Image (tube, grey):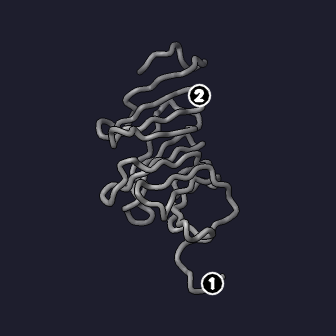
């Protein structure tokens, strides 16, 4: 190992599940992993991460950078097997980047996917294993989703109606 290259952390043998590049930045990317972490990586270094984000207790299925990414707004989302969606601020100091854990109180299934609204910086959607689709607006309410929709009827729901 080159002794001159000290910054970063060496990757352990873990599977990557999702990657995303911040808007207008082709030099770094975020990688969601099986080991419950998200790594910020450089395209220049294949065996080291620049930062590691911890907080999930299950594999992280997706990472999505805000489409409004800028020097003032460096926010990204992650979703996981641990039933949560987490909102992170890359600009915060190491260890304090997680800003919010979005978890609808009745959700007891893994969150499989997330996507930002292309038009509103505070809105995103999540999709869970139980067929639940949640639309969140962090500006209006960061404690519960603005809308919940079931794409299938299961034993916990009575009908396919929005909350």
Q: Which residue is painted at 42% across and 41% down in the image?
A: 116
Local SS, label 2:
loop
As drawn, 63 above or below 48: above
Q: Nearer the viewer, residue 73 or 163?
A: 73
Mark 1 is surrounded, within 10 Å at the Cα level, by few (under 14), some (14 to 19) or many (20 or more) other residues, namely few
Pinpoint residue 38: horizontal percent, then vertical percent. 54, 56
Q: Which residue is painted at 37% across and 62% down in the image?
A: 92
Pinpoint residue 103: horizontal percent, then vertical percent. 47, 38
The furthest residue to the bottom? 3
* Residue at the spot of label 2: 130
Quadrant that contains the C terminus = top left
Quadrant that contains the N terminus = bottom right
Report the number of numbered marks.
2
Left/right placement of residue 33 relative to residue 149 reads: right
Pinpoint residue 63: horizontal percent, then vertical percent. 52, 49
Q: Which residue is painted at 37% across and 56% down in the image?
A: 74
Mark 2 is surrounded, within 10 Å at the Cα level, by few (under 14), some (14 to 19) or many (20 or more) other residues, namely some
Task: Locate residue 112: give its quadrant.
Answer: top right
Q: CA distance from mark 2 to mark 1?
A: 48 Å
Left/right placement of residue 14 relative to residue 73 reads: right
Q: Which residue is painted at 58% across and 71% down in the image?
A: 45
Dot 2 or dot 1: first in sequence order is 1
């Amino acid at each position: 190992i080159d002794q001159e290259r000290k910054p970063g952390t060496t990757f352990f043998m873990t599977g990557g599940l999702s990657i995303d590049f911040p808007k207008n930045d082709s030099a770094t990317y975020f990688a969601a992993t099986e080991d419950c972490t998200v790594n910020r990586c450089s395209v220049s270094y294949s065996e080291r991460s620049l930062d590691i984000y911890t907080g999930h207790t299950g594999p992280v299925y997706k990472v999505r950078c805000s489409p409004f990414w800028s020097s003032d707004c460096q926010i990204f989302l992650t979703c996981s097997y641990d039933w949560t969606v987490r909102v992170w601020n890359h600009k915060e100091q190491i260890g304090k980047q997680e800003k919010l854990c979005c978890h609808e109180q009745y959700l007891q299934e893994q969150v499989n996917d997330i996507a930002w609204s292309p038009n509103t910086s505070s809105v995103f959607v999540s999709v869970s294993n139980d067929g639940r689709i949640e639309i969140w607006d962090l500006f209006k309410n960061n404690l519960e989703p603005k809308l919940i929709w079931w794409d299938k009827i299961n034993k916990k729901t009575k009908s396919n109606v929005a909350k």
